[in-house]
């Protein structure tokens, strides 16, 4: 009798799943709730979507054209690890002119593959196993999983509509333990549209100093503020060297697909991030860097026009939600409204799923954004006026029928 | 020339985008009251700043054979009245869609629409070039319109965004 020993071996190891090979810190993180909702929506026709987290504008033509020209000229090679000197110069000038923060292009600015890479670099550079990372929520979905992957412990801090989803000093203080190391700030906020003013920052800065925290400030929506200019946390006195400033081109210049971002901070921190960046990424795409430089050099007028247009639509949706009886705090930044759906008695997830099925409107349930998101719905208003009007009409009908 | 209030400037921008925006919608979008918006629009109309609410049509999709020509016209300006009186004599013809006074090699640029090529040709030879102060004309027929008043006619720029993204 011939025994096929290969088969036998297979059978004895049948119980070991491929998943068992995975690193536990990766295995334990959940796919984002946004992903789940994406799967529900895709394939559906005639849907109006308020679920999109990116501008509805196409990248301005002059930016696209500059990239095409650079390709024709053969600008297709690696750049310096930290990005082209011209782009870093332009970023430094831009940040200084607009947000009064000064960074040395040589060793305090690193061009990254989107703000996303910058967040990853910053968290990985700072976290040692067991460190607690403080994350005001509801928040963008990336900070907590990256923290977990790096061996850190995410600690959510709930923020509330009654405070316009601003981070409150008392709540921050209450969340701090001896293990707290990093505070992640993300204002203007995706998903709430909340912002922090200079006065809002001052008490936060005090606590940061008192507890010797390092701050990662994700200011990707800095250009999209509607009542006064954005105040960078790095511009608050004493905070510059404690802050890793993350930003990028996606939102302000309608350049999401280009994946162009940057991170600024103390040279010691940037050089640590540069180490990770040079071993994993090498450099941000050369053609994207050309486009980003063009956006900063000649794109301000177009950017202002886009911001103006978001602002008009912001007023429209907020009024629209209030008119159909949904409470909606006034978002002062980004391009999301975050109305409460609590009066319907449904959970965010139920509401969003039924809204999709019964009213053909897609929006993201608030609970996917962490603490404080349950009972809310994230609605992007980066969509045409006619679509917004129709969406609000449909949501109104839907809510009315729920009675 | 007067400096318009910010509200009026924004109203003009939005109405240029879509003249059917209601005062209520405009008021919400601009953070003004409906009354303010109505008054501002009325004033813009009275001051002939807003002169007409028109529709931009992609006539290549229509089954008519109208032709449009741009005509360069060289003229001798009239003493004391410059180019204006001759421009008036040109623009009063209903088939003339627009008239511009130009710098450079010629003086007036006249846009003429006719039922067909012959129609435009006879307007040029019988009406336009026979005017006393007209020295010469050069007629250019428009073969295809790609973009008009900021609207790209064959724009298939669909929304390629993911339906849901973080």
Image (spheres, coloured by chain):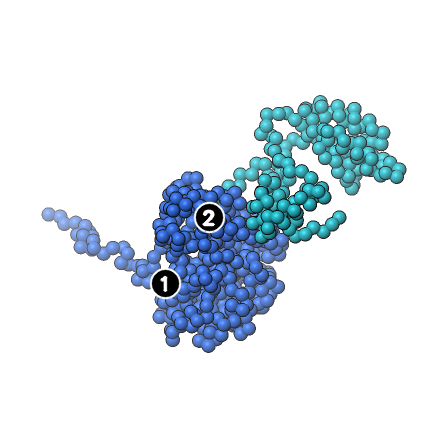
Chain colours: A blue, B cyan
Marks 1/2: CA distance?
A: 42 Å
Quadrant of residue A149 within the rendered picture: bottom left
The earlier-in-sequence mark between 1 and 2 is 1
The numbered disc on residue A149 is 1
Q: Which of the 4 image quadrants contains residue B59? A: top right
**Circle 2 sits on which residue?**
A324
Q: Residue A57, percent across and down?
A: 54, 48
Q: Position of residue A188 (x, y in %)?
A: 50, 60
Element on which disc 2 rests:
loop
Residue A56, given in percent of the width and then of the height, sits at: 52, 48
Q: Is residue A259 above or below residue B163?
A: below
Using the rendered image of the protein, determine whether residue B104 is visible from the camera's viewpoint. yes
**Chain letter behind tag 1:** A
Same-chain check, marks 1 and 2: yes
Q: Chain of mark 2?
A: A
| Residue at horizontal 55 percent and vertical 62 percent from the top | A230
Q: Residue at x 47, y 73 (%)?
A: A208
Residue at the (41%, 47%) spot, across then down: A399
Badge count: 2
Q: Position of residue A61 (x, y in %)?
A: 59, 47
- Give the residue at x 78% y 42%: B103
């Amino acid at each position: 009798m011939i025994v096929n020993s290969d088969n036998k071996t297979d059978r004895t190891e049948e119980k070991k799943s491929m998943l068992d090979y995975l690193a536990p810190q990766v295995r334990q993180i959940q796919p984002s709730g946004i992903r789940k909702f994406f799967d529900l929506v895709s394939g559906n026709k005639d849907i109006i979507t308020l679920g999109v987290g990116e501008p509805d504008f196409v990248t301005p033509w002059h930016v696209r054209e500059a990239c095409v020209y650079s390709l024709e000229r053969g600008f297709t090679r690696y750049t310096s690890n930290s990005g082209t000197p011209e782009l870093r110069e332009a970023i430094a000038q831009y940040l200084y002119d607009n947000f009064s923060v000064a960074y040395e292009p040589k060793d305090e600015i690193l061009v990254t593959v989107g703000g996303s890479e910058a967040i990853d670099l910053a968290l990985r550079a700072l976290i040692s196993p067991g460190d607690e990372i403080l994350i005001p929520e509801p928040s963008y979905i990336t900070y907590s999983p990256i923290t977990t992957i790096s061996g850190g412990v995410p600690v959510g801090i709930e923020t509330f509509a009654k405070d316009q989803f601003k981070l409150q000093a008392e709540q921050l203080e209450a969340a701090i333990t001896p293990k707290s190391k990093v505070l992640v700030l993300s204002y203007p906020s995706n998903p709430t549209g909340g912002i922090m003013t200079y006065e809002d920052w001052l008490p936060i800065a005090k606590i940061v100093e008192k507890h010797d925290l390092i701050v990662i400030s994700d200011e990707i929506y800095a250009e999209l503020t509607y009542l006064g200019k954005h105040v960078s946390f790095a511009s608050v006195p004493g905070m510059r060297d404690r802050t890793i400033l993350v930003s990028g081109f996606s939102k302000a210049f309608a350049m999401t697909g280009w994946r162009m971002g940057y991170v600024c901070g103390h040279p010691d921190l940037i050089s640590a991030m540069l180490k990770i960046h040079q071993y994993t990424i090498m450099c941000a795409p050369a053609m994207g860097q050309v486009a980003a430089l063009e956006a900063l050099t000649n794109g301000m007028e177009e950017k202002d026009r886009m911001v103006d247009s978001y602002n008009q639509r912001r007023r429209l949706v907020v009024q629209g939600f209030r008119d159909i009886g949904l409470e909606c705090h006034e978002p002062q930044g980004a391009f999301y409204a975050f109305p409460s759906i609590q009066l319907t008695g449904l959970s965010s997830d139920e509401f969003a799923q039924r809204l999709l099925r019964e009213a053909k409107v897609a929006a993201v349930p608030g609970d996917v954004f962490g603490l404080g998101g349950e009972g809310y719905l994230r609605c992007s208003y980066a969509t045409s006026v006619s679509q917004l009007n129709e969406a609000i009409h449909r949501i109104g009908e839907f809510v009315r029928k729920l009675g | 020339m007067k400096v318009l209030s910010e509200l009026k400037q924004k109203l003009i921008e939005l109405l240029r985008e879509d003249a059917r925006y209601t005062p209520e919608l405009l008021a919400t979008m601009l953070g003004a009251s409906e009354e303010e918006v109505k008054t501002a629009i009325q004033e813009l109309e009275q001051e002939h700043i807003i002169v007409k609410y028109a529709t931009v049509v992609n006539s290549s999709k229509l089954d008519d054979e109208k032709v449009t020509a741009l005509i360069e016209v060289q003229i001798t300006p009239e003493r004391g009245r410059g180019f204006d009186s001759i421009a008036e004599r040109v623009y009063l013809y209903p088939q003339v869609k627009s008239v511009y006074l130009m710098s450079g090699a010629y003086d007036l640029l006249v846009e003429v629409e006719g039922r067909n090529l012959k129609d435009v040709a006879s307007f040029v030879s019988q009406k336009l070039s026979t005017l006393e102060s007209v020295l010469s004309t050069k007629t250019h027929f428009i073969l295809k319109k790609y973009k008009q008043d900021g609207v790209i006619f064959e724009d298939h720029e669909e929304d390629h965004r993911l339906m849901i993204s973080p």
